Image: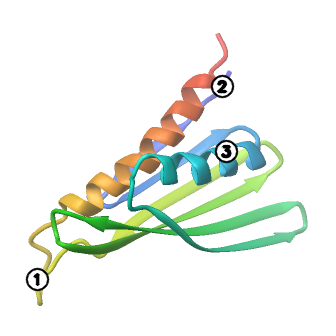
Amino acid sequence: MLETVRRLIDMAKYETNLIGNFDELLNELDLGIISRSQTASFEAASNYYANGVRCSVRVYERYSVFGSNRLSMTISLFGYGRELFVSAISSGGSQAMFFKINTLGEEAFLKHAIDVIEAYIASHRQS
């Protein structure tokens, strides 16, 4: 049975542990995030492997109508066999100088990643 531990920390950070296929989830994240926004773009990637542990970091950007600016989201996927951990953090949607007053764009962008991850979890849940 697929078991997950989910945490929504702050308004622009999502993390979860899950069981799955590293390459499959990474591919679904890449395709799913870009397809959910007309202005989303894939900016950069980094991949690392050592002693059976894999790590991929992805950076995406998109235009935020709410903040009239671009914001970014970084997704880190770690894997050891079928044990996976994913962390998604979005930032940059506020125009305030000293504190954030508008995080709607960040939250909306993060929701794209959450939707992809939750759909992956649901599609791999065993009865």
Q: Is residue 17 above or below residue 9?
A: above
- The location of residue 57, given as percent across then percent down, is 63, 69
The amino acid sitting under disc 3 is Leu
Q: Are marks 2 and 3 in contact (CB under 8 Å)?
A: no
The CA distance from mark 3 to mark 1 is 35 Å
Kindly identify which residue carries mark 2. 124
- Whichever of callouts 3 and 1 sits on the residue coming sooner in the sequence is 3
Q: Secondary structure at mark 3?
A: helix
Name which quarter of the figure residue 126 lies in: top right
- Whichever of callouts 2 and 1 sits on the residue coming sooner in the sequence is 1
Left or right, 69 with respect to 34, comes to left
Q: Secondary structure at mark 2?
A: loop
Q: Nearer the viewer, residue 16 or 23?
A: 23
- Whichever of callouts 2 and 3 sits on the residue coming sooner in the sequence is 3
Classify mark 3: residues with Cα within 10 Å, few (<14), some (14-19) or many (20+).
some
- Which residue is rendered at x = 39% and y = 54% of the image? 38
Which quadrant holds the C terminus?
Answer: top right
Q: Nearer the viewer, mark 2 or mark 1?
A: 1
Name which quarter of the figure residue 30 lies in: bottom right
- The location of residue 22, given as percent across then percent down, is 75, 48
The CA distance from mark 2 to mark 3 is 11 Å
The CA distance from mark 2 to mark 1 is 41 Å
Kindly identify which residue carries mark 3. 25
- The location of residue 51, given as percent across then percent down, is 90, 67
- The location of residue 69, given as percent across then percent down, is 24, 76
Q: Are marks 2 and 1 in contact (CB under 8 Å)?
A: no
The amino acid sitting under disc 2 is His
The amino acid sitting under disc 1 is Ala
Kindly identify which residue carries mark 1. 96
Left or right, 70 with respect to 41, comes to left
